[in-house]
Structure formats: structure tokens, C-alpha cells
Image: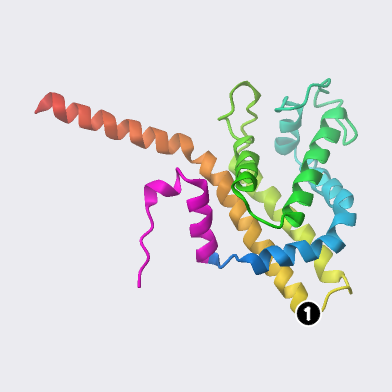
Amino acid sequence: MTEHIDGNRLSQDLRYRFEYISKFINFTHDDITALNTSATIVLPLIPVIVDGVYRKLFQFDITKNFFVLRNDGFDGELKSNEGLTLNSAQMTYRRDMLSGYLKRLLLQQAWTDDFLQYLSRIGRMHTNNVGPTSINVDYIHINATLSYIETLLIDAIWVTDNFDSKTKKDILTALSKVFRIQSDLFLLHYLEPLQDKDTSTTHQKNAEKCVCS
């Protein structure tokens, strides 16, 4: 039997959106358990993984340029592009943020509404929808970065001898699903202006019809 999905509610109700995606990609508690299992191997490697992510972002001026912008929560002195290094204060802050995110992603045992809001905020803070602290990172860079993080995590799991083949498969499958969910929660906020524009256009057309009728 075909299940009805409310398209409007998908963009308005975070839990409803998550449950729809979870059903579609079959993200279950078993996947969460697999992520928790992976933590025994991945957590000690997080400093190396995070360092690798930011070294990759520093390889391109278009991504490095975002780190000279003041983002929400950082009150220290900003280095200019010329003086910016991986050890600058704003980069230490970013590394700590990414480290905390990865730890929470792997250790979270129940995907509560609070946790979904946390994942949603991660997406929103990279758009231009948060006022003066907006950094407005184009989605192409977000997508590339998420893919690179996922690849580093896959490599860490693939080479370990601590898990059998089935456990590895379960963890890698869970990682794939998690990054699709996180990617969607980025897109949710990147598409907000387009949805608002469509709504405004619809209201304007309806108003014009009323005037002309």
C-alpha cells in the first residue's frame, strides 16, 4: 500500500522529514548501533581526520577564503588570508567544532529531536540565513567536504583489523546513510530562499488575478 507523504510538511517538520528519509534509505537503530561500534576505532583518529579535512580545504583559495570570515561563536582575533595558518586561533576553533561534531555523530545513541535540531543547525550556520554571522558557503564546497570526510572515515574502517567483514559492511553502510541525511539537512536550509521566493511569487500571481478579475 502506498504511503502518503505531505510535501509541504517535509520542509516544515524536521522529525517528519527525518522519518521519511529514514524509511526511504532504511536507516534504523541497527545503523546507529554500527556507528557507535565504529567509535572504538574512529575516535582516537579524529584529530588526524580533522587535520586532513582542513589541509584539503586549504589547498584551494575558494575554500580557504571562508576561514577569514567571523562565524558564530568565535570571538578571537581573525587572521587575514595571508597570515592564516592551520594553527591560527580561528582554525583551532573550527577544528574543535568539527571534532565535536564527529564525536557526537558516532556516539549518539538516540536520534532525538534535540539531536536532529543540532544536525539542522550545522546546515543552517553555513548559509546566509543566520544574520550578521552568516558565512554563506556555496553548497558545492559543502558537498565536496562532506564527501571527503566520509572518504576519510571509510578508509579508517576499511584498514582496521578490529572488525570482521560483516561489521565493516554495516558500519560503512551506516556512514553512507548518515552523510546522506546530513547532506539533506544542509539542502533544507540552502533551498529556503527558493521556497520563500516561490511562495512570494505565488502570492503575487494570486493578487494579480484578484485585481484583474
Give how far across and how far down residue 8 sits, in percent. 38, 46
Magenta segment range?
1-24
Task: Give the camera-side residue of 192 and 107.
Answer: 107
Please indicate whether residue 141 sits to the left or right of residue 45 in the image. left
Residue 69 appears left or right of 127: right
Q: Quadrant of residue 41?
A: bottom right
Give the image location of residue 146, x and y in percent: 68, 51
Question: Which residue is nearer to you in this view: 82 or 107?
Answer: 107
| Residue appearing at x 65%, y 24% in the figure | 133
Q: Which residue is mark 1?
A: 165
Pick the front one: 108 or 5: 108
- Please indicate whether residue 12 sits to the left or right of residue 139 in the image: left
Q: Which image quarter: residue 12?
A: top left
Image-based side of 129 in relation to 99, left or right:
left
Magenta segment, principal secondary structure?
Answer: helix
Instruction: Tell me where residue 172 appears, x and y as whole percent.
Output: 72, 68
Residue under the point 59% across and 34% down: 127
- For mark 1, does the 10 Å Cα neighbourhood hold few (<14), some (14 to 19), or many (20 or more) residues? few
